Amino acid sequence: MTTFSWRGRRRSAPVSRSTGELLTAFTDLTPEQLAVPAPPETGRLDDGIAWNLDPRRGHRTHGRGWAPVDAARRLPVFRATTDQIGGLFPLLAAHGVPAVGARMGYDVATGGSFYTHPPEWVLRKIVTNPNMIIFGKPGRGKSSTVCAFCLRMMPFGFKTLISGDRKGEYTPVLRALGIEPIALGPGSPRRLNALDLGPLRTYWPAWSTERQRRELDVILGRWNRLLLSLAAAQGHVPSVTDEYVLHAVLRQLVGADHSSDQLRPVTIPQVTGLLADPDTDLWTGTRFADRTEFTTATRSVTDALSNLVTGSLAGLFDAETNFDLDWDAPIQSMDLSRLDPLGDKAMNVALTCLGMWSSMLTSLHNTAGDGAGGAAGGAPRIVVRDEVWRQMGLGLRAVQAINADLRLSRSDRTIQLLIMHQPSDLHAVGAAGSHEAAIARDFLALCSTKILLGQSDAITDDLADQLGLSSTEQAAITGWAMAAQGRALWKLDNRPGMKIQTVLSGTEKTIFDTDAGMRTDPRVEALNSTNGTGGPDIGGQRGEADGTVPGIDGVNDTLTEEGR
């Protein structure tokens, strides 16, 4: 045993291996090679190198770095390449996430940059699916994190579809890129047909009969689920007979049972009209004894769907779509802020229509190839579902629709990004133990990437139960993440959570400012807006065909260090 003195006290320590022996264990160098001579005396020159002129143990003055041990004489100097030096610190490791994709900020544990690319993580077996879910209290930076992710994925070929912007938070981002969002609601001339065929009508004539049948079965299934979801939102409990009848109605209206080079457009009023006044082919084809029996059996579902075109949503989803969605734009959004005065029910139904419509068109656009059914077309997409709990509140069919989109994200080449405030949003789906509640709980498993911003203690306890968070991870969410905006615990499947600070550039801070409305008089904002855009111009033009986005190119390489 050897002893040493420390401030007057004597402590014993076991004899251990020398530093040279430890270094030898982690390198191929021999002890002789590691035995580097001590530096020359203070002030001497050796081969033109001026060594430190201060005493080797520092000055014996407070704050001047004095040390009781002459480390320069007792420890060998070791030099190695960057490839070898990693072996000297076996207990220090980075987070293990590859440096590919959108640079979001930095890992506070290692100081290294943090990059996000969910599809690449799937290919590298880091996660099992590309979907993401984000939780956080209002004001913790959810919208800024989402906007930064979408913008910074654009140079990598990803386009974004905001499937229902309830508060108009994404409108400044679109206008900064020279894109006008699609506004729906009172006072807007825009109409969106929830049963729109989209790209299907363009590709239909060139497809083979087999391809036509396959694609039509998919789209009719989506329409059927949408109509049943909307009927359930009106208080109607759909039956298997309703599902069977609606399928027959949709096939007849779209012209699937006739040899034609084109499909006919279908609207919800046409569906309710045929249900209320069926022709002979319809009621006999669905095995009813007569017309009266048909209308009596389908009266409830007919009335439920009719409320969608005569009530608060009249004029929104009851006519053919009168705008073209620009699939070449780097981002598209549907602004629903005008629907707010109509109440939660109108908003929830609109979000359901938009969710189904956007998922259908995204799927069709990605799978539609040449006439022979060739390579998939279109860029991969990020589908942002803000306040998704509203759509889930419409019942089982709505939950099943979201569940299907999450499960098909890899084949549809999409990243489904769900935004919620707290885990109780998943509990508000149906009664405890119900089928829809069980499906909603699976959303956490279907979203491999969880972004957990600041929360209160009670909510974090709920998160810990559902995600299996450790006490350290819980403390990070309730303490560290609450101290500043943009701080979040990122969990990739069952990996330990990473404390990531999102860093925004000056331009991003301006266009992501969701609190601007609380500081600025809307009348002044209208007077100061340029060309009616109401937001800063960071490009003025839509993204080019090669995937570049004016004004944000290089954002991954030029992030400021603010927030460190």
Image (spheres, rainbow, N blue to C red):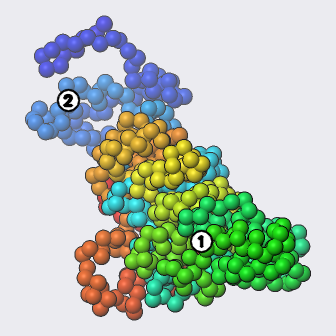
Mark 1, secondary structure of its residue: helix
Q: Mark 1 points at which residue?
A: 304
Quarter occupied by residue 7 = top left
What residue is rendered at 25% in x and 82% in y?
521
Answer few, some or many: residues within 10 Å of disc 2's Cα (few below 14, many 20 plus, some between 14 and 19). Answer: few
As measured in the structure, the alpha-carbon distance from the residue carrying label 1 to the one carrying label 2 is 82 Å
What residue is rendered at 50% in x and 68% in y?
348
Q: Earlier in the sequence, mark 1 or mark 2?
A: 2
Mark 2, secondary structure of its residue: loop
71 lies above or below 345:
above
| Horizontal and vertical percent position of residue 157 | 60, 69
373 lies above or below 31:
below
Which amino acid type is marked by label 2? Ala
250 lies above or below 412:
below
| Horizontal and vertical percent position of residue 247 | 76, 69
Which amino acid type is marked by label 1? Ala
Q: In which quarter of the image is the C terminus?
A: bottom left
Left or right of 563: which side holds 309?
A: right
Quarter occupied by residue 485 = bottom left
Q: Quadrant of the N terminus?
A: top left
Nearest to the observer: residue 28 or residue 280: 280
Could you say which disc has been placed on residue 218 in the image? none
Q: Name the residue under label 2.
A: 67
What residue is rendered at 53% in x and 55% in y?
132
Answer few, some or many: residues within 10 Å of disc 1's Cα (few below 14, many 20 plus, some between 14 and 19). Answer: many
